[in-house]
Image (spheres, grey):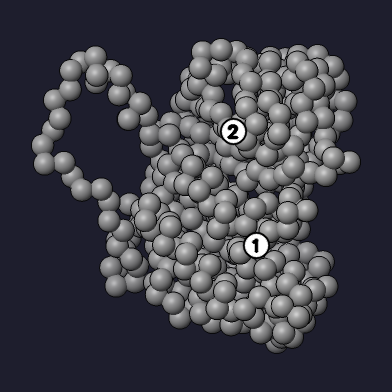
C-alpha cells in the first residue's frame, strides 16, 4: 500500500507530446497482483474451432463510459417520439474498431431503436462529413432491448484517435421513455425534430439536454487496460466547466498518455454519480444510483478491459445520514473492505482516495466531520488497498484543514472547480498506477 500526498503545482492541460517509460514498481510498496496461471502446453485447435474463437484475441477496452441510474420520477422523465438523439462523448484511447453498449436496465418496458450510428463530432450536433458509421446488433440495423437488460452493438471498423469527440446517434421510431439515464453529463446533447437523422451530418435541433440517456459505454479494440473511476458527484464532475471535459478522470486520462507515452494507453471510464453512496440508496430517489456495493458488478466488472478502479466514496453516506442515526466509521470501513475483496477476487487493483474537506458545506456538522476524519485515518493506515491517494491533504486549506482551499472551491465548499480537479489528477503517481495494470 502506498499513500500519495504530494503537492503538485497545477499545470496547463497536458500535451500529448511528452513520453517516457514507466519505472519498475517497488514490490514493497504495492500488492503483487497474480494473473492467470500459464497453461502447461499449447492447445491444438481444429481450424474451424480456432476461427470460431477468434474473439478471444479482440482485446476490447472501454474508451468512455458513464453509470446508468433511474428511473426518474414520471413527472420529469424525458421521452423521445419519432426523434433522433445525438449523444456527445469523448474517447480516452483510440482504436481501429468501435462498439457501443446501450442500456434499458432501469426500464420497465422494451426499448426499440430503429437506427444507430457513430461518427466524429465536428461541433455542436454536427458530425464530420463521411465519418458516420451505421451500427448493427446481431447483424440487424434495429434492436429491441428488453426491460432490465443492456445490449452490445456489433463492432464496426472505424479509426478514432485518442480524445476524439464521438457522436452516437439513436433513432426512436416509436416513443421511448428515458428511464435509464445518467443525469449529469456536463455535456450538451441534442434531440432532433421528428425524423430519422441518425445518418445525417446535421439536423435541426429541437432541444438540448444535459444528460446521457441509454448510452453507457463505448469500446475500442487494441488490448489496452481500463481504469474505472467509481464514486459520487466529485468523480462525476460537479463544479467543472460544461462541455470542456474537466472532471478529474478526464485530466488523468490526458496526463497518462502525455507523460507515459505508449505505456499510458489506458482507457478511462467515469462511473461517478452525483449523490451516490457506498452503503445505501433511497428507493424513492433513484437518479443518484444504486449504492456502490450493489452496482459494482454492472459498473465495474462488466466494463471491457477493466484492470483497476479508483474509488472516492462515502461523503454522501455521511452527510445524508441523520444526526440520530449517523453512519459509523466501522460501517464504512466494512463496506470498503467488501469492495476490495470483490475486486481482488476478479484480479482488479483497488486505488482509494481520502474524502476531501467539507466545512462550509450546507450539511456539515462537527459530528459528520468526525466520521470523515475517522474513515480517512483508516484509509491512510490500511494495507488493504493497492494505492491510496490523499486528496484530502492536497485540497485542504493549510490554515484551516477542515475546509477546501479557496482556490479549489467551486462555490459550495465541497465540490472542487476545474483547478481542483486538475490538481487531484496531477497528484496521482502515474508509474505506480500503470504498474498495477501489468
What's the residue at 34%, 71% (across, down)? 29
Question: As displayed, is residue 134 above or below residue 289?
Answer: above
Residue 247 image point, x, y percent: 66, 53
Q: Secondary structure at mark 2?
A: loop
340 relative to 12 in the view: left or right: left
Q: Residues within 10 Å of mark 1 (few under 14, many from 20)?
A: some
Q: Which mark is residue 280?
A: 1
Q: Residue furthest left?
A: 41
Q: Which mark is residue 314?
A: none
N-terminal of the two: label 2 or label 1?
2
Residue 414 image point, x, y percent: 74, 69
The residues tagged by marks 2 and 1 sit, at their Cα atoms, a distance apart of: 23 Å
Q: Does the image show residue 345?
A: yes
In the picture of the structure, the residue carrying the numbered disc 2 is 149
Q: Residues within 10 Å of mark 2 (few under 14, many from 20)?
A: some
What's the residue at 56%, 17% (across, down)? 136
Question: As displayed, is residue 77 above or below residue 44?
Answer: below
Amino acid at each position: 500500500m502506498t499513500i500519495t500526498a504530494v503537492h503538485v503545482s497545477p499545470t496547463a492541460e497536458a500535451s500529448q507530446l511528452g513520453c517516457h517509460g514507466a519505472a519498475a514498481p517497488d514490490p514493497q510498496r504495492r500488492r503483487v497482483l497474480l494473473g492467470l496461471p500459464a497453461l502447461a502446453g499449447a492447445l491444438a485447435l481444429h481450424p474451424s474451432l480456432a476461427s470460431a474463437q477468434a474473439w478471444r484475441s479482440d482485446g476490447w477496452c472501454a474508451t468512455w463510459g458513464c453509470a446508468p441510474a433511474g428511473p426518474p420520477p414520471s413527472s420529469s422523465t424525458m421521452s423521445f417520439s419519432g426523434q433522433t438523439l445525438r449523444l456527445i462523448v469523448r474517447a480516452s484511447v483510440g482504436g481501429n474498431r468501435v462498439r457501443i453498449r446501450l442500456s434499458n436496465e432501469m426500464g420497465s418496458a422494451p426499448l426499440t431503436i430503429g437506427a444507430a450510428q457513430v461518427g466524429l463530432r465536428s461541433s455542436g450536433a454536427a458530425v464530420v462529413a463521411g465519418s458516420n458509421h451505421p451500427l448493427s446488433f446481431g447483424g440487424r440495423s434495429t434492436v429491441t432491448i428488453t426491460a432490465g437488460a443492456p445490449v452490445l452493438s456489433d463492432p464496426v471498423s472505424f479509426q478514432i484517435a485518442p480524445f476524439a469527440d464521438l457522436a452516437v446517434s439513436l433513432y426512436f421510431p416509436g416513443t421511448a421513455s428515458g428511464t435509464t439515464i445518467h443525469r449529469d453529463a456536463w455535456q450538451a446533447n441534442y434531440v432532433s425534430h421528428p425524423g430519422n437523422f441518425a445518418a445525417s451530418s446535421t439536423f435541426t435541433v429541437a432541444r438540448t439536454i444535459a444528460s446521457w440517456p441509454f448510452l453507457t459505454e463505448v469500446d475500442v479494440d487494441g488490448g489496452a487496460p481500463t481504469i474505472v473511476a467509481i464514486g459520487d458527484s466529485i468523480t462525476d464532475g460537479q463544479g467543472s466547466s460544461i462541455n470542456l471535459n474537466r472532471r478529474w478522470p478526464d485530466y488523468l486520462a490526458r496526463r497518462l498518455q502525455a507523460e507515459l507515452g505508449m505505456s499510458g494507453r489506458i482507457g478511462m471510464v467515469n462511473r461517478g454519480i452525483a449523490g451516490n453512496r457506498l452503503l445505501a440508496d433511497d428507493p424513492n430517489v433513484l437518479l443518484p444510483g444504486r449504492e456502490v456495493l450493489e452496482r459494482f458488478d454492472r459498473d465495474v466488472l462488466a466494463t471491457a478491459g477493466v484492470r483497476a478502479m479508483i474509488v472516492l466514496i462515502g461523503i454522501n453516506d455521511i452527510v445524508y445520514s441523520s444526526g440520530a442515526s449517523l453512519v459509523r466509521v466501522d460501517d464504512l470501513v466494512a463496506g470498503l473492505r467488501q469492495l476490495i475483496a470483490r475486486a481482488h477476487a476478479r484480479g482488479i487493483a483497488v486505488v482509494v482516495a481520502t474524502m476531501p474537506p467539507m466545512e462550509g458545506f450546507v450539511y456539515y456538522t462537527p459530528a459528520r466531520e468526525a466520521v470523515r476524519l475517522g474513515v480517512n485515518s483508516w484509509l491512510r493506515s490500511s494495507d488493504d488497498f493497492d494505492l491510496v491517494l490523499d486528496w484530502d491533504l492536497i485540497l485542504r486549506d493549510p490554515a484551516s484543514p477542515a475546509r477546501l482551499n479557496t482556490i479549489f472551491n467551486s462555490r459550495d465548499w465541497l465540490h472542487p472547480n476545474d483547478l481542483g480537479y486538475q490538481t487531484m489528477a496531477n497528484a496521482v503517481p502515474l508509474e505506480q498506477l500503470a504498474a498495477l495494470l501489468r
